[in-house]
């Protein structure tokens, strides 16, 4: 049994979750996930690693489904709640999920696809009483979850994480960040990515802590929750801190002071998933009295490098390798580098994923000899702390904490009848980290509002370009490849 579920029994009467005004104990979670596991199994003894996709609102229902899949021996495939249908069906087809669990509000969106593809559709709240069976023993080496992440291939890849991987990721953060049953965290992050799933939900629930869900990010509602004085831990991406600061600046002085007092009493505030601008770190210190703890991670590895809980938290740096995680920097030939020399971050440890789902070549390419995972991120070790310098590929963009493949957007954009050619780049932006921008070659009149709507039906909204530039031609190298760094300055022209 995954240790998160085994440990829940030790805290059975403690409050695990606050969701939409209701409170649920660890016992409630165990009971709901067990009943759902029976329903998933429908008389079988073990799902034997078949994929169960779910599109469920963050809250008690989400965790019950996640735990039920694990308890039944299945693999969790959490879907993004805001993705358009083509992005959802891509994941359903790529994972060949047999079962789909949805919150009632997503039933209409997915019912046709489920029917046509013979997927069993379970609508939460409409489960049926099913046969009680003995739940299977699920070994730690078995696959637990597939998360989709964009990379240097145009389509997102499924990252397969085992129970052992998840346990290693949770354990290292528990030790490094001092998680305990006295903690209370609020989640505002989407629950199809590692940051929300592991760092917030699984770490809190593995430690008998309390987790409050805010279903959708709202600075005002989040400040209301902080002001209740129960939450003492918070984790988010830099864009969220930017938005909180912008909102706080507009508040009357008495509310500002009350928020400052509430935040000062927090135990821990963490930031990651993208570079934390030093200005955001400083503004947040003024508002909260805390120096944000910045850390570095990735879907494939969980968290790898972190500033310390106690000790210097250095602005612009991500700190030191986490316990149990090995980190090295290498040059283009794969030679390990000395401190002060910039190179690619490579990571090894039980935290590192097993493979890309059904992509043996991509998996092989992702690892250097010795089992080191090539992150594609560049860093330098300075005075004992790692500082992230950027990525080895210009085709990977991070916006609002989401990883975006330029190639995926280009491929879709080229299908538009008015677009002859295009290049997607990320433009530096204080709020979003990077803004998706498109240089397009076209001889036709383009209605950019209509083009945006056309793209939104095909790719997730956060991947849709925010800036367009019409160009007569794109700069190319001798191999005929578009020179992206040459495209970027065009936007400033
Ligand atoms: C949305 N908008 C954007 C945008 N996304 N504009 C520019 N760039 C983007 N990327 C615009 C919308 O069009 C809309 O504009 C307005 O912002 C509000 O949209 P929204 O969708 O309601 O945004 P909001 O809910 O405020 O979302 C912002 C956010 C969200 C920061 C809360 O992006 C988010 O949850 N990000 C976290 C992603 C995450 O968890 N990443 C971790 C990956 S794991 P208009 O004009 O229409 O109003 C990982 C590993 C690790 O990275 O290390 O953790
Ligand atoms: P994802 O694939 O969505 O998990 O995103 C992982 C990527 O986010 C990493 O490869 C980094 O490029 C980036 N990232 C995560 N944390 C940080 C950080 N603290 N500073 C800079 N980049 C970060």
Image (cartoon, rainbow, N blue to C red):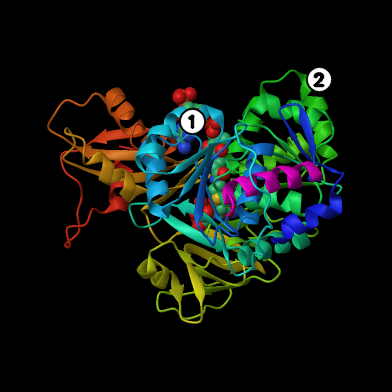
Instruction: State the quadrant of the C terminus.
Output: top left
Identify the element where label 1 is drawn: helix
Q: Position of residue 64 (x, y in %)?
A: 67, 43
Q: Position of residue 36 (x, y in %)?
A: 64, 44
Q: Is residue 472 left or right of residue 324?
A: left
Q: Is residue 275 visible?
A: no
Label placed on residue 254: 2
Residue at left 55%, top 29%? 104
Instruction: State the quadrant of the N terminus.
Output: bottom right
Q: Is residue 22 above or below residue 477?
A: above
User: Which residue is farthest left?
Assistant: 443
Q: Is residue 19 left or right of residue 51?
A: right
Residue at left 79%, top 60%? 311
Q: Is residue 415 left or right of residue 409?
A: left
Which is the main secondary structure of the residues drawn in magenta?
A: helix
Q: Is residue 487 above or below residue 417?
A: below
Give the quadrant of residue 409: top left
Give the quadrant of residue 222: top right
Q: Is residue 468 visible?
A: yes
Mark 1 Cα-neighbour bin, 10 Å: few <14, some 14–19, many ≥20: some
Label placed on residue 107: 1
Mark 2 Cα-neighbour bin, 10 Å: few <14, some 14–19, many ≥20: few
As for residue 401 lying within the magenta part, the answer is: no
Give the quadrant of residue 89: top left
Residue at left 68%, top 63%? 167
As for residue 29 lying within the magenta part, the answer is: yes
Q: CA distance from mark 1 to mark 2?
A: 44 Å
Identify the element where label 2 is drawn: helix
| Segment colored magenta | 27-43
Q: Position of residue 398 (x, y in %)?
A: 47, 47
């Amino acid at each position: 049994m995954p240790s998160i579920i085994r440990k829940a029994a030790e805290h059975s009467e403690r409050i695990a979750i606050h969701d939409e005004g209701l409170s649920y104990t660890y016992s409630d979670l165990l009971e709901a996930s067990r009943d759902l596991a029976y329903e998933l199994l429908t008389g079988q003894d073990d799902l034997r690693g078949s994929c169960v996709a779910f599109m469920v609102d963050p809250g008690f229902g989400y965790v019950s489904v996640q735990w039920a899949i694990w308890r039944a021996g299945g693999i969790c495939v959490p879907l993004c709640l805001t993705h358009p249908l083509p992005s959802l069906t891509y994941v359903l087809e790529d994972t060949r999920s047999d079962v789909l669990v949805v919150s009632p509000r997503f039933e209409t969106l997915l019912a046709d696809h489920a029917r046509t593809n013979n997927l069993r559709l379970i609508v939460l709240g409409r489960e049926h009483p099913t046969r009680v069976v003995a739940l299977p023993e699920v070994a730690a080496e078995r696959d637990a979850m597939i998360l989709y992440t964009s990379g240097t291939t145009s389509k997102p890849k499924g990252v397969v994480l085992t129970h052992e991987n998840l346990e290693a990721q949770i354990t290292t953060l528990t030790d490094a960040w001092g998680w305990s049953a006295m903690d209370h965290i609020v989640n505002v992050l989407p629950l199809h990515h590692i940051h929300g799933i592991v760092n917030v939900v699984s770490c809190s629930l593995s430690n008998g802590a309390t987790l409050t869900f805010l279903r959708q990010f709202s600075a005002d509602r989040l400040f209301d929750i902080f002001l209740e004085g129960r939450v003492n831990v918070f984790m988010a991406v830099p864009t969220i801190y930017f938005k909180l600061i912008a909102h706080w600046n507009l508040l009357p002085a008495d509310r500002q002071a009350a928020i400052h007092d509430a935040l000062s009493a927090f135990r821990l505030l963490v930031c990651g998933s993208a570079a934390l601008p030093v200005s955001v770190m400083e503004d947040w210190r003024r508002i909260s009295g805390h120096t944000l703890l910045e850390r570095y991670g990735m879907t494939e590895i969980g968290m790898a490098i972190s500033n310390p809980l106690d000790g210097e938290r250095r602005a612009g740096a991500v700190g030191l390798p986490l316990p149990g995680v090995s980190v090295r920097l290498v040059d283009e030939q794969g030679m390990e580098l000395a401190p002060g020399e910039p190179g690619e971050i490579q990571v090894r440890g039980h935290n590192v994923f097993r493979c890309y789902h059904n992509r043996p070549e991509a998996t092989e390419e992702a690892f250097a000899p010795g089992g080191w995972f090539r992150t594609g991120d560049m860093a330098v070790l300075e005075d004992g702390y790692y500082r992230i310098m950027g990525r080895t590929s210009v085709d990977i963009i991070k916006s609002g904490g989401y990883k975006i493949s330029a190639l995926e957007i280009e491929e879709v954009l080229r299908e538009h009848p008015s677009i002859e050619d295009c290049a997607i780049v990320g433009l530096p932006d204080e709020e979003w980290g990077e803004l998706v921008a498109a240089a397009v070659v076209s001889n036709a009149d383009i209605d950019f509002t209509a083009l945006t709507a056309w793209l939104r039906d095909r790719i997730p909204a956060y991947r849709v370009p925010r800036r367009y530039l019409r160009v007569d031609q794109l700069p190319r190298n001798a191999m005929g490849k578009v020179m992206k760094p040459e495209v970027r300055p065009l936007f400033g022209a």
